[in-house]
Image (cartoon, rainbow, N blue to C red):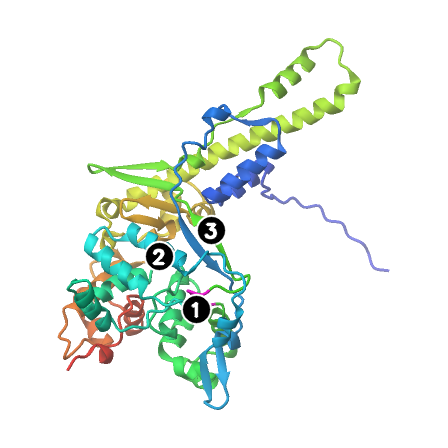
Amino acid sequence: MSSLKQNLSQKLLQKLSPQQIQFIKLLQLNTLDFEEKLEQELLDNPALETGKSEEEDTFSNAEDVGTEEETFSNDIDIDELLRYNDDEGGFRLNEDYDDDQRDIPIASSSSFQEFLEEQARATFGNEEDLTLAIHLINSIDEDGYLRRELRAIANDLAFSENIITNEDHLERILIKIQNFDPPGIGARDLQECLLLQLYKKDYGNNPAISLAETIISEYMEAFSKKHYDKIKKALKIDDDALRDAIKEITRLNPKPGMTQGGATKTMYIVPDFIVRNEGGAIEVVLNSRNTPELRLSPAYAETLRAYEASPGKDRNLKDAVQYIKQKLEGARWFIDSVKQRQHTLLSTMEAIVSKQREFFVDGDEAKLKPMILKDIAEKVGLDISTISRVANSKYVETSFGIIPLKFFFSEGIATEDGDEVSNREIKKILKDAIEAENKKRPLTDEALMDLLKERGYHIARRTVAKYREQLNIPVARLRKEI
């Protein structure tokens, strides 16, 4: 007969309190979701009230700054993303999307153009660039592609509107438009459309996305013909890695300008923070919609005090009093969580602005410093997961546009001197070098790699190619002019 042994051991377990759980849930909400949660809490808990009368409702002075954002379903099958054609032995853009437009949540195609124009007005401070941007936006077709040659658009501007520009200038404007929402907008072809979407998803820590970028940028033809063995051999990867990369590719939208039944919903981008530059003094404020004035219900509190003060407590009121206590306690928790949320949001944004002050002065991306979540977590004395919740789905309004907080986080690259610079600085160097190159003998990725080494940046050729592609700059042979 086997013996039964009993062991007594002590374990230290960290368990979150209900208040902490509530705070965490509130922290990860953006401004619109927080408003919805607040309204629901006010409905569910009669012991919670706004601190002002209806005439002075705290939301009446809210800053209703926002632009529409389109979000797409990520459940597109590969054979829907690209239709296989047995006769031609390859893929092509799935034309069935045209037949499945059932629920379009925007009133007309013009409203989608207006959505892009709103983003353009928040991006281009120069009147001339804004005019060019709007002309390019009006040239984008219903699929979300810019299929006209930039040279033809430049000619149209010269003859019809007497605006003189060139392809290079239009290319720079288009690159900024391609950073608008929805991801993939303004692409010239399917390959560029997919890459633009992958670049927006790439935060440097997902090998499947990085591999997907390589496949689309370097092996698009093999991928379109399902020559998977060729891709695996060339990249020295196994079936699992390829499967993960293809899964990321099939989640992309091949027609970002089109809406499909159930695949799109309209929401608004409301900035959670406002950063103002007042004569060199950078001021950070929370959107007032995040700072409601809340209080405990005076009627509920008075009822509880009266019951506690009464000499002979009525047993029939015991259940009602218990209910009041629960509601008052819940209201206190919620008010404390909201205040903690406000403090955490503001201190985190102030830390980001302090780290990236040079950028907030004039909006020059080259002045962005390398910054990861850990840097801000250490600065404000919070956990990295807390900073991640703040950065997720939050936006800041600046004098040069509405920017997602994730934009400010980038990996650093070490120089020969031991200094660290943002990878955006590397991209600026590459962009400037390519703009100044001899177009009859454009710089190859190898030459660009050597140029960076001369400046103290030791970066692999593949990384150079990745940064060039993220800048929407074609390979050297396509930049060559006769």
Q: Nearer the viewer, residue 125 or 367?
A: 125
Compared with 183, 332 (above or below) is above
Q: Indicate the amino acid at tag 3.
A: Met
Point out the tag, 2 or 3, that comes first from the N-terminus: 2
Instruction: Rate crowding at label 1 as few (under 14), some (14 to 19) or many (20 or more) other CA atoms within 10 Å.
Output: many
Measured as percent of width and height from the top left, residue 273 is found at 37, 41
Q: Indicate the amino acid at tag 1.
A: Lys
Q: Which residue is mark 1?
A: 255
Please give the name of the residue rendered at 42% of the width and 84% of the height, measured from the top-left corner. Answer: 222
Task: Give yes or no for contact between labels 1 and 3 (Cβ–Cβ under 8 Å).
Answer: no
Q: Secondary structure at mark 3?
A: strand
* Magenta segment: 252-258
Q: Quadrant of the N terminus?
A: bottom right
Would you say residue 203 sits in the magenta stretch? no
Q: CA distance from mark 2 to mark 3?
A: 14 Å
Q: Secondary structure at mark 1?
A: loop
Q: Which residue is mark 3?
A: 267
